[in-house]
Image (spheres, rainbow, N blue to C red):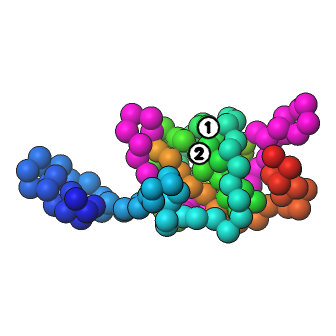
Amino acid sequence: MTCNAFAAYSQVHIGLTHPPLRCLHIDMTGNSTETKRGTPRKPLRARGQVAATGTPVQSGVTIDISVDGISMMLAAQVADGAACHIRFEIPDGGATKVIQASAKVTYCVCVGQQGFRVGFNFSAIDHSRSQLINAL
């Protein structure tokens, strides 16, 4: 069932109304065909925070990272295209460093009771932080 067909079905048969759905198509390897980054992703499981314009700060957990962006699991939805400020931890040798970056939301997908998987594209990240990400 397509996203639009599901929205129509849920409104007519179940009485649900909600904002327009946005489909995120996943290929059989588990990669998003809509949000592939130009640089390799690396797994990163760490604490993070997101401050989107006009919303309270949310804490979450990072999923993966590249020098272009990061994906995180959050409890609440964040609007596509929202400008955000992100903080997350990254290992650096035996220590942990906190990285801060400006980013834009590229997708936000509900994954059941786990919350929302949110993809961010970094607006700007300095060279030393890019080196830390590449070293993972």
Between 97 and 52, the one lying in front of the other is 97
- Residue 18, how many percent across, how many down? 26, 54
Res. 73 mark: none
Q: CA–CA distance between discs 1 and 2?
A: 5 Å
Magenta span has 102? Answer: yes
Tag 1, which secondary structure? strand
Tag 2, which secondary structure? strand
Q: Residue at x 49, y 66 (%)?
A: 34
- Residue 116, how many percent across, how many down? 46, 44
Q: Residue at x 81, y 46 (%)?
A: 136
Question: Taking the image as drawn, is residue 10 in sight?
Answer: yes
Q: Would you call the spot at circle 2 few (<14 residues within 10 Å), some (14-19), or many (20 or more)?
A: many
Q: Are circles 1 and 2 on residues that touch, CB within 8 Å? A: yes
Which residue range is magenta in the image?
89-115
Can you say whether 51 is above or below 20 in the image?
above
Type of the residue with mark 2: Met
Magenta span has 48? Answer: no
Q: In this figure, which residue is indicated by the disc labeled 1?
A: 61
Report the magenta stretch's main SS: strand
Image quadrant where residue 20 sits: bottom left
Q: Residue at x 83, y 54 (%)?
A: 134
Res. 72 mark: 2
Q: Single out the residue that lies furthest toward the left.
A: 13
- Residue 77, how many percent across, how many down? 45, 48
Q: Earlier in the sequence, mark 1 or mark 2?
A: 1
Question: Taking the image as drawn, is residue 83 in sight?
Answer: no
Image quadrant where residue 89 sits: top right
Between 29 and 114, the one lying in front of the other is 29
Type of the residue with mark 1: Val
